[in-house]
Amino acid sequence: MKALYSSSAFTANIFEYWKQKFEIANDDIFPLLSSLNDLLKLETQQIVNISYEKQNIIFPTAREHPCLDINFECIGSLKDIGFECKYREPFYNIYKGKSNSDWSKFDIYLKKPRNHWDGLSNLFEFASKKNDFRYLDVIQLIRHILGLNIKHQNNKDKYALIYLYCPSYFKDNSIYADEINQFNDIVKLDEIHFFSFTYYDLFITLDKNILKKDMAYLNYNMIRYL
């Protein structure tokens, strides 16, 4: 958790500050809420719960369920904002000569009956092809969408999934960005609210909304990660 390269530490450094403020006084997190609304172009009125490793069940009898890195439960038409946060992980396997598309355990999601794919016909077709992605872990993102969609009974206006990531400074970033855009194009066909933005986008937007008393938090993260 103390390692600079740790995605878990990055997630905690970004969100734990606001989670603690939320638990003391809900209104104290409006800079974060305003920043998310600016980035998502959605009007989230109020956050009522913030939790790490939020599980959404796809198969009740399964041992493993997809866990969102952090989840905001909201009041209003939008009920859940789930985050999948990545830092350097997309690049680890590449240096080992491996891709990030491990479809070996995905067949269970493709077997009949396929009620869990209701309303997600384009995503199902995409997943059935098992295309190789070098950097983006599409399997993880698909599982998150399945879990959220089941929870909200195929009402896609009730949830949003955010892919929060750090770009590479090397030439492989163009491939990484293309993979994110490709996945985004697919899920948009099923009218899923999927958003991707970088930590830098979040920092810049927070800088516009943050209060003076919160500047030490933002400066710490900007110095540590930028």
Image (cartoon, rainbow, N blue to C red):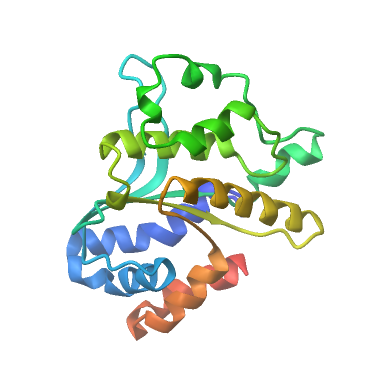
Pick whichever, 36 or 118, lies toward us: 118
Q: Residue at x 50, y 31 (%)?
A: 124
Is 179 displayed left or right of 162 in the figure? right
Can you give x and y, in whole percent of width and height, for residue 154 in the image? 30, 39
Q: Visible in this render: residue 1? A: no
Can you give x and y, in whole percent of width and height, for residue 179 in the image? 66, 49
Pick whichever, 78 or 156, lies toward us: 156
Residue 223, quarter of the rendered image: bottom right
In the rendered image of this protein, does residue 144 appear above or below residue 72?
above
Please tell me how many numbered marks the rendered image carries: 0
In the rendered image of this protein, does residue 128 appear above or below residue 154?
above
Can you give x and y, in whole percent of width and height, for residue 18 in the image? 32, 63
Q: Visible in this render: residue 110? A: yes
Q: Residue at x 20, y 58 (%)?
A: 23
Q: Quadrant of the C terminus?
A: bottom right
In the rendered image of this protein, does residue 24 appear above or below residue 189?
below
Pick whichever, 170 or 12, lies toward us: 170
Can you give x and y, in whole percent of width and height, for residue 73 in the image? 25, 51
Q: Residue at x 46, y 59 (%)?
A: 13
